[in-house]
Image (tube, rainbow, N blue to C red):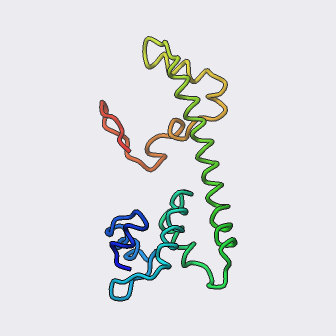
Amino acid sequence: MTIGDVGRRSGLRPSAIRWYESIGLLPAPKRRIYDEGVIERLGIIRLAQEAGFSVAEIWTLLSGFARATAPPARWRALAERKLDDVRTAATRLREMERVLEAVLRCRCPTLEDCGRAMTRRPEWKRARPASLTTSAAQQGRPSPPLGRKASR
């Protein structure tokens, strides 16, 4: 099967297929002819991407275990860690949602008044985002010049 055939069957551009080869997620074909197994491997890559796995994690899934390691053990090892990351991110997103909803209700005449009002709220004292409780320097970022927005 040619790279064009693989692309049509998988829905990927040839450049994406070549990139997967270059980073070690797909084996290089012999004389640019692919075997049928490449379609299944691309399906695994796509599933892992949809689960939020990084390229490094996908490489580990495909090549980072002993050959005899069964697929369920591979998925479980990576999914347990990723699920912890997803749950942490979901908690963070709920906190962000809460803060955004609070600022949408803001009726303060100045930002200083808003800052005072927000810091008096009980939930502010409980759990506030690290980006609001530590300085840029503490986060390892330079402080923006006065009058300019910090970029991330």
Q: Position of residue 62 (x, y in %)?
A: 55, 75
Quarter of the image with the N terminus in it = bottom left
Quarter assignment of residue 145: top left
Q: Position of residue 80 (x, y in %)?
A: 67, 61
Quarter of the image with the C terminus in it = top left
Between 12 and 95, the one lying in front of the other is: 12
Above or below, 81 against 14 in this view is above
Q: Residue at (55%, 25%) from the top-left corner? A: 101
Quarter assignment of residue 28: bottom left
Between 88 and 69, the one lying in front of the other is: 69
Q: Position of residue 50 (x, y in %)?
A: 53, 57
Above or below, 16 against 106 in this view is below
Q: How many marks?
A: 0
Above or below, 126 against 68 in this view is above
Q: Position of residue 89 (x, y in %)?
A: 58, 47
Q: Residue at (48%, 13%) from the top-left corner? A: 108
Q: Residue at (48%, 46%) from the top-left corner? A: 138
Between 105 and 64, the one lying in front of the other is: 64
Determine whether, in the image, residue 20 is placed left or right of residue 63.
left
Q: Report the residue that reaches farthest toward the bottom.
A: 30
Determine whether, in the image, residue 20 is placed left or right of residue 146.
right
Q: Residue at (67%, 24%) from the top-left corner? A: 122
Determine whether, in the image, residue 59 is placed left or right of residue 145.
right
